Structure formats: structure tokens, C-alpha cells
Image (cartoon, rainbow, N blue to C red):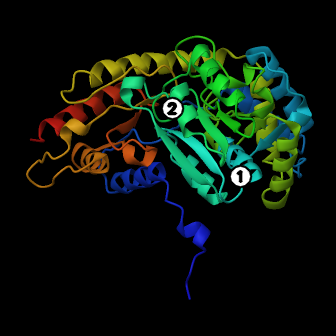
Amino acid sequence: MNELSNRLNRLSPSATLAMSQKSGELRAQGIDIINMSVGEPDFNTPAHIKAAAKQAIDENYSRYSPVAGYLSLREAISAKLQRENGLDYAPSAISVSNGAKQSVCNTLMALVNPGDEVIIPAPYWVSYPEMVKLAGGTPVIVSAPIEQDFKITPAQLEAAITPATRALILCSPSNPTGSVYSRDELHGLADVLARHERVMVVSDEIYEHINYVGRHESIAQFESVRERVVVVNGVSKAYAMTGWRIGYIAGPEWVVKGCNKLQGQYTSGPCSVSQKAAEAAYNGSQDCVEQMRQAFERRRDLIVRLARQIPGLEVNEPHGAFYLFPRCSFYFGKTDGKRVINDSMDLAMYLLEEGHVATVGGAAFGSPDCIRMSYATSDENICEAMRRVAEALARLH
């Protein structure tokens, strides 16, 4: 009687949201939890962006927007892509959605048929495989371990492509690893993709501005594949606007039209006030973006140094985003006398309940030997969290 659809039963719940909820429950019991499970900047939205939203309310931007978003916002995004990325997309080749998450999902729903395969490098963001399944496709996971800095090679990509391959999802800078593909590395992948004309690329670039190695590189820059790349981005991470829910795609107009058709049936255009705020973000001073980037880089240096002092954790140096993804399999099979740590999910729960630090087990990201720690929090919280983690892990034998 009470049966959910097969479509929904095939989906897994979000592990990141589940861990965040669990830490919230413990906090409600009066326990001091440091939350390193959530992928969200801890800064407030910059003042000039909030001022634009207030002005939009006063000017009665309170009605439905066009399904693809206001033309003025799409023009601002077009200008940003030209200015910062050297990419030429007309406003008609851009569609604005309720966050980059919907932008990815729209694209997959528009492109993928039952039986189609979608290549997903692992570690991956938790929602990618679930979105592919929602679209009726089959996720094909290609693993890149810490020894490869969590990045797949052209040879791995070539080996994964079959006649059923419809798309590759690429995320750089990466959630959950912070790894960043260089121009040469992207060029190598593009050379492979150029030989397989049916394969589209969904390029998730939401962490573009949280980058510690210089200029962001997009796979859309390569002429050989550009007409098959859908760039996904938004304001959440760069401008500390996670709750405003504005993301976008820029890509071939036939894909964008398909996404608009889809979006027109199930959400329509995104929040009108948020769109005017996003417009101010793209058109205004970018000093706030650089200030936050510098803070994240300082925190990256801090957490890497502290994590490398903990025996048993294998730590690479992330070049973007705000995550550390250490390999922790050294602790599997160990016990504190009360429980045995069988895997990274057990370890994450142990660190939460015994160390009072919320992390996320790597199995949710396709890398069961690792855990994800978000350093989008204060220096003080990072220092205290890593002290607690070190003490809790020291009790495992």
C-alpha cells in the first residue's frame, strides 16, 4: 500500500546531509560538535550583494522570471565567462537554475536515456551517481586513488568509454578531494573525447574561484570538444551564497533549450530576488571573492599541516575547494575497546560520537578508504577539531 516508486527506491540518501543532521541532533543535546561535514562557506554574503537583493524587493522583483532566468543575469554570466574564462556564450546559450545541483540534474535528464552510461571519476560528489540513476542511466565509476592526486588519466578514460557512453561528469576543483586538473591534464582528456563524438561532458566548475594554483582551467576551452561541453557553475561557493540557490549551465543551445523545456515543467525560473543578487555578484567588485579565497588557502595550509602530524593519515595537498580527503584505512580493524572500526563510515561515526567532530565517510564519495573534512570554518575550529581527531584516533589500537 505505502509503496514509493522504483525510481526513488533506487536512490541513496545524501550521506553529507545525513551526517550534518546527525551532528545537529547531538548539538541539540548540548554536545559541542565541530561540523566539518558540510560543504558551505562560513562567510556571510557580501554587503553589496545583499543590498542588491533589498533593492530588488523594493523594485518589486516578485513575479515569475523567464524560465531560463532574467536576460540581464544571463548577460552578466555571458560577460563573466568571456572576461574570466575566455569562453564565448551568448545569453541564449545560458540557463539559470535553482543552484548548480539542479543545473547538473537538468543536464543529465536532458541527455541521458535508459541504458546510457555516464562516466564518473571517483572520488565523486555524492549526488552524481544518484542523478544518473534518476535519469535512467548507468553510472560507470573510474577510480583515481590518492597516488594519482585523485585525478583520472586519459588512458583510464579511454578504457571506460563504450558504445553506450553518453557523458562524462568532470568536477574541477573537486568535491570531495580539492584536486584541480591542469590545462595539460584537461587537454589529454579532451584528446580522448574528441575521438568519441557521442560523448558529452558535464563540467562542474562551482569551485572555480577557490583555487590555489592560479588561473582556473575549463575543458570547454578546447575547440575539439567545446560543442559537447556543458559548463556548470553558480554563486554558492565563490560569493558565499549557498542559500540563494542560483546556478547555471552554459553550453550548446540545443542542450540549453532542452533544459529550459524540462525546467519549465517542474520548477520554472529560479527565485527572482536571488537572480538580481547574483547579477550584482557578477557585475560588482570581485575583491570579496579574492579575500575569501585567501582565507581558504590559509586554512588549507593549516589543516594539511595538522593532519600530517597525525599517525596513520595519508594526506595530499588539495589545490582548490575547501576539503581535505585523507586516506584513513590504517585504522580499519582497530578498536577503542567498545567498537571496531570496519570502514570509513564507522570511523566518521566514531569521530562524531567520541571526538565530537563531524566528517563524512569516503564510501559515499566512491572512495571507501578516505574521509572528507571540510575546512570551511574558522582557524580556531580547525585547530580544535584536529586536536580532537588526533586524540580520538590515538585511542584506537
Seen from the viewer's position, the closer of residues 81 and 285 is 81
Going from the N terminus, do you reach mark 1 or mark 2 first? 1
Q: Mark 2 points at which residue?
A: 156
Disc 1, SS: loop
Furthest toward the top, the residue is 214
Q: Percent position (x, y) of residue 290? A: 61, 15
Seen from the viewer's position, the closer of residues 51 and 297 is 297
Seen in the picture, residue 200 relative to 336 is either above or below; the reply is above
Q: Percent position (x, y) of residue 225? A: 75, 27
Q: Mark 1 points at which residue?
A: 112
Regarding residue 218, the answer to whether it shows in the image is yes
Residue at left offset 37%, top offset 51%? 23
Q: Percent position (x, y) of residue 37? A: 42, 42
10 Å crowding of disc 2: few (<14), some (14-19), many (20+): some
Seen in the picture, residue 294 relative to 63 is either above or below; the reply is above
Residue at left offset 87%, top offset 42%? 254
Three-letter code, disc 2 = Gln
10 Å crowding of disc 1: few (<14), some (14-19), many (20+): many
Disc 2, SS: helix
The C terminus - image quarter: top left
Seen in the picture, residue 284 relative to 26 is either above or below; the reply is above
Quarter assignment of residue 169: top right
Seen from the viewer's position, the closer of residues 245 and 205 is 205
The N terminus - image quarter: bottom right
